[in-house]
Image (tube, grey):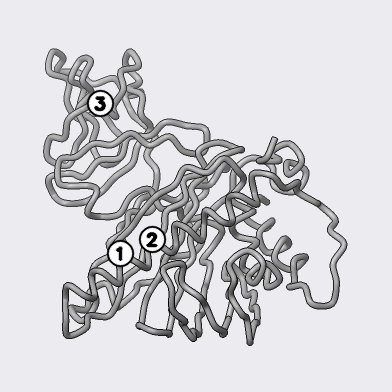
Amino acid sequence: MGNNAEARQNSFKGYPRGWFVVAFSDELKNGDVHTLNYFGKKYALYRGEDGVPRIMDAYCPHLGGSLARGKVNGDSLVCPFHAWSFGPDGKCNHIPYSARIPGKALVETTPCKEVNNIVFMWHDPAGGAPQFDVPVMPECEDDEWMPWVHAKLRVHTHPHELVENVVDVGHFSPVHRTQVEKFENEFTGHIAKQINSGVAYPIGGGVDKYHIEATYYGPGFQISRWDGFMEARLINANTMVDTGSMDLRFAVMLKKGKDARQTEAFQRGYVENMSKGFQEDIDIWMEKRYVENPVLCEGDGPFHKLRKWYAQFYA
């Protein structure tokens, strides 16, 4: 199998701890209810009439109806089966045919927050509270910047393949045709950073001399600040569906130019280039084997540091 799920279980067993992207804000309107299938479980994501997104387990404790097919009432989610209503704390707050609510009528909730016009969920297999935060991007509230243009791919591999790109300086030229002139890594706590300068050749043509600082905040998402032909902010995020597949979300925002239509066209082009670039990676991932103890050479990046950093989220 191309995903090497079994081979990787010795180092990264199960699911990691961290913040993970489950939607962009424009995908979740007031009153919307979505099904989330992540980390081997089913969740209900909804936005209350108060505008706040929330996540809870998908199944009603009454007779197992799917809350992900329910309806929003105020800040509560109502089961479609018998209309039991559950509030933001997961407790049942109304049963239409019973004055008494059973004490065990509650649903497990999951920490959820909306930052940078993105909806995140906290996942910890041990049930622990969030240990770090999602950094605020001031560009998301700045009228000088365009809103996110985003896309999503379902990829049948472990997200460690994606995260390992942080240190894999050697793959940029043969896989992406990028000339790297400067490449550094920094690891501090839950943060892993790549500082990278060089020359890129966009798939649509042209030359782009760039400088990028790409930073992971935990194992689930990376924010990049790109200075090149245009000033850009990028995000890529992985959320595990199961131990052998993930949803890969990616997005770009550009600083507005004098011509809005031209800026929008450039932004769509960036996303298309990101999609094609990820597909180049995916083509490699689908046919490669995970090597737990790789034979490295002097020009390779700090793979062992990256794997040690990544493993902390499985402890």
Q: Residue at x 66, y 41 (%)?
A: 3
In the image, residue 281 above or below residue 253: above
Q: Secondary structure at mark 2?
A: helix
- State the image coordinates of residue 52 (x, y, percent, origin top left): 21, 51
Q: Amino acid at mark 2?
A: Glu
Residue at 25% of width from left, 26% of height from top? 69
Q: Which residue is identified by label 1?
A: 268
Camera-side residue: 207 or 119?
207
The foreground one among 62 and 21 is 21
Q: Which of the two labelled residues, at mark 2 and mark 3, occupies the earlier sequence position?
A: 3
Q: Above or below — where is 304 with respect to 244?
A: below
Residue receiving disc 2: 272
Q: Position of residue 262 (x, y in %)?
A: 21, 75
Q: Are marks 2 and 3 in contact (CB under 8 Å)?
A: no
Residue 304 figure quarter: bottom right
**What's the CA distance linking mark 1 and mark 3?**
33 Å
* Circle nearer the viewer, 1 or 3: 1
The percent position of residue 212, horizontal first and vertical second, equals 50, 80
Q: Which residue is identified by label 3?
A: 69
State left or right for residue 100 relative to residue 216.
left
The answer to whether marks 1 and 2 mark residues whose Cβ atoms lie closer than 8 Å is yes
Image point 30% across, 18% down: which residue? 65
Q: Is residue 143 left or right of residue 13?
A: left
- Mark 1 is surrounded, within 10 Å at the Cα level, by few (under 14), some (14 to 19) or many (20 or more) other residues, namely some
**Residue 218 badge:** none
Query: Which amino acid, by three-letter code, is at mark 3?
Result: Arg
Compare marks 1 and 3 and give the one earlier in the sequence.
3
